[in-house]
Amino acid sequence: MLTKRELQRRFMAHLDPILLLSISLLMLLSLVLIYSASDGNWVRVLGQFVNILVAFAAMWIVANMPLHYLMRSAVPIYILGMVLLVCVALFGDISHGARRWLNIGIATIQPSELMKIAVPLMMAWYFEKHEATLTLKNYFVAALLLLLPVALIARQPDLGTSVLIGASGFYVLFLAGLSWRIMLGMAVIAAASAPFLWSMLHDYQRHRILMLLDPSQDALGKGYHTIQGMIAVGSGGLLGKGYLNGTQTHLDFLPERTTDFIFAVWSEEFGFLGNLILLGLYIFVIGRGFVITANASTYFTRLMAGSITLTFFTYAFVNMGMVSGILPVVGVPLPLVSYGGTSMLTLLLGFGMLMSVHSHKQLVKT
Amino acid sequence: MKRHVELKNHQREIYYFRFRLMLSLSLVLVMLLILLARFIYLQVIKHDYFQTLAESNRIAVVPVVPNRGLILDRNGIVLARNYSGYTLEIASRKVVDLEATINELSTLVDIQPKDRKRFKKLLAESRNFDTLPIRNRLSDEEVARFAAQRYRFPGVEIKARLFREYPYGQGTSHLIGYIGRINEKDVDQLEQEDIASNYLGSDYIGKTGLEQSYEKELHGTTGFDQVEVDAGGRAVRALSRIAPKSGNTLMLTLDAKLQEVAEQAFGNYRGALVAIDPTNGDILAFVSKPGYDPNLFIDGIDTENWEALNNSPDVPLNNRALRGQYPPGSTIKPFMALAGLNYNERTPSYTISDPGYYTLPGNRHQYRDWKQGGHGRVDMFKSIVISCDTYYYGLATELGIDRIHEYLTGFGFGKKTGVDMEGEVSGLIPSQQWKMRRYKQPWYAGDTVSVGIGQGYNLVTPLQLATATATLANDGIAFKPHFVKQIQRSNVNAPDVAPQSVFDLHIKPENIDLVKRAMEAVTKPGGTAAGASAGALYRMAGKTGTAQVVGMKQGEKYDASKISEYNRDHAWFIAFAPADKPRIALAVLAENGGHGGSTAAPIARKVLDYYLLGIIPKPLESGLDKEGVEND
């Protein structure tokens, strides 16, 4: 018979207290904000609570999983993700002008979400496998493992997700020691091919980039989101207008208040001080991620943990940057805060891996 | 030695890795500083500026819904129009206790239980932030009563807006269709087509019929008002406006009076009628009986009416003319005759001796003629006039299913006509390949026999049969059937939509002439439609048909009185007139009407009489204006 205390200990055994505390605070903040952003809609709040519970359970399972399970799952998950992506391209459901969803009878799924985990996992696995004999060829193959799904997702079109997955894969390459000369070369090539890429973009994507340069140009149309977001953030001032008192939020000026623009709600109602608190929480999460990464015991876990941490930061940066008007509106949620079950699940799976990396490191032979 | 090198590499690797990690960390910090700087800029330095924007600049962009285009018949009679009226609407998310609010409201305006039911249904189907109507078409008195008490009802408002109305109701229901409230599925569709912004203020969208098919023309372009709103979100001042552009008016090829004559000619029969001008494909009448009242659907139909319509055995919501698929019965015979001539399987003078049944070589199964004992000696002309089954059993067998398939498909059977209305179905002309695909069975010789008289696997829609009849009447030159004659933009007279000639079958003049003469003889004494055509003051050509609903066993006799109504045969009649220079071609189907000659042909006769002579059938009351009609 286990005592209550023993049960508690076992439950918490693989959960990292520092990460747990900071992400719990962020999720609590999410519930508080969604209540305001949805004009007091309890259904929405409850929905997010369920999202959190489900994602939390997933995190616990992954955190308790030994690392070799994770490694062994890399290839099958990646292949599954690729097959699903190809299926989406061939016969996915079209919604909102993009082909992102796959109807599998019981539910519709968005395989690009799976790839957010699968791509860095696969690349880290690949580098671990060839650790002893890394040559340029290996970097090339890893880059291919990254570019295939990114290209498929960009074609859907889902620019935001493809950029984020591209970033998460790039972090793996970077941490795996891709040489500076090659990175410089790629930067030059990217700059040179910019005009070509521009011509490949969809009209609405170009529009969003142009609007970033001058949102007032189309104040009633696509620039509207950016302008209203900036007004919300700016009018929040030092201390904010107070909880439930944001005029931008409650007079329907802000678009997508519970999802992509939830940061504007926070900024308006809690001001600069609130933003400092939010940034502080994110720094906590990211800082802890860096510590776990630096102390990780194997090549695979180092790459994986580093990529997860940096990607998490990228999410936060891109979302806050887009709402405050320094990045284009690309439809990236504010991590752990925006309403949404899938992104919550993906994020907490990542944190589960981080925790597993940390708590299982003693058990792995170096 | 080797072990030593590896160990060294490993340590160096960790060193490099941590170096790169530190680099990333510094980059992260730099980015955070950028964000911080941006927040300071927006929230501290420019705070006053944005504060002013947020407070005074409460500019809301309010979409202004354009007026929906009208739908007129070819003579300008209005078939769909708008009228202005008041509606009482509730913004459900601003109201705490909906039930109580509605109870309170019912003391001021008349709110029936069915209004409540409809409101609940709308609430369940609606988009999140809609305001929904609890009552439409308020009286002036009700408007005044509510206005005086308005302060008691936050979130409830009176709106003036245009209502859609279909003055011909049932008579044009399957043709015009109806508009209804925009639902999630419509939103998805609009977003896919990237035109959602044009529907920002719109509550309605075409759901069926021409309202749906010509949605883009009818809707118009949404305008925008920039208004200043107070802290409560109410508009206080208009700043600027981009005016909406009204939808285009559709002028149809339809003749509304002809439509009404045709509709009433059906009496109590279910069925369909499509009349087409063979020289250009104009659809002159398009009836599917029974119809329904499209006005019921506009603001969401109430449950009782919906269940009555949806569960009726007469399926009034089914557009039979466009989507009903029936065996063509003997109306296929003129087309089969043309096929026989075309492939040189028959000459006009080739004669059979009809014993009243047909047997395949080496088989004892008897395919019976409708007339016991047979018609005696029958050539092609007579085979059409008296509708001899035995002649066509033999012809079909000798043509073979693949040539039948080829010829009838060429005539437009078994595929969509391309009419400008959504939801058309293609009918079916079987082939060996089709049967293999569909049933995984080879084609049997016996399958072909009944195809010859329009039974068996083949299916046609009334629209298809009317189109094919028009093509035959026009000597094999086919026009795409169409409903819209003009799209009138901003009330200027528009040019007619050009008729689209889709193919020319290049039928030999002597062949088409023979078949047309035979079809004219059908309407003369001795022909199967002689009764219905007696006394016609123009030259009429036609062909009767009877399509079996239930099959009969060998040796069994068809007795209508012993069969339940819904299993009785369908009656067909195709016709065109005047026979020498056809101005109208049509197909009539009377479901479970028995013989084509006795039920379908009289309906066609009334339609032709009206169209060619202006004769209004006796029992027809209602809104036909009798003065404009000349009576020969």
Image (cartoon, rainbow, N blue to C red):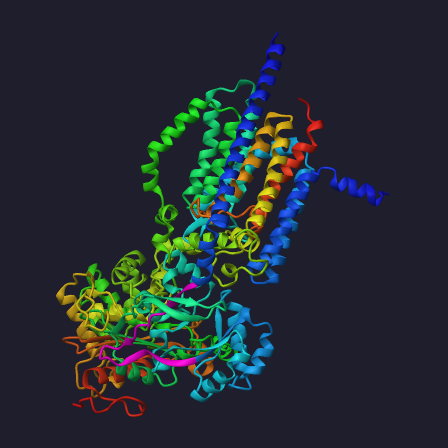
Q: In the rendered structure, which segment of residues is drawn in magenta?
A: B58-86
In this orientation, which residue lies closer to the viewer: A169 or A85? A169
Question: Residue at horizontal 25%, vertical 68%?
Answer: B481
Above or below B632: residue B99: above
- Tell me which corner region of the image, top left, top right, bottom left or bottom right, holds residue A44: bottom right
Residue A140 in the image: state x and y as whole percent: 45, 26
Specify the farthest residue to the right. A1
Residue B103 in the image: state x and y as whole percent: 58, 82
In this orientation, which residue lies closer to the viewer: A250 or A179? A250
Question: Residue at horizontal 62%, vertical 55%?
Answer: A32
Above or below A249: residue A182: above
- Residue B64 among those drawn in magenta: yes
Question: Residue at horizontal 42%, vertical 24%?
Answer: A182
- Residue B181 among those drawn in magenta: no
In this orientation, which residue lies closer to the viewer: A259 or B3? A259
Whether residue B297 sits left or right of residue B485 in the image: it is right
Whether residue B1 sits left or right of residue A259 in the image: it is right
- Tell me which corner region of the image, top left, top right, bottom left or bottom right, holds residue A67: top right
Whether residue A148 sits left or right of residue B402 in the image: it is right
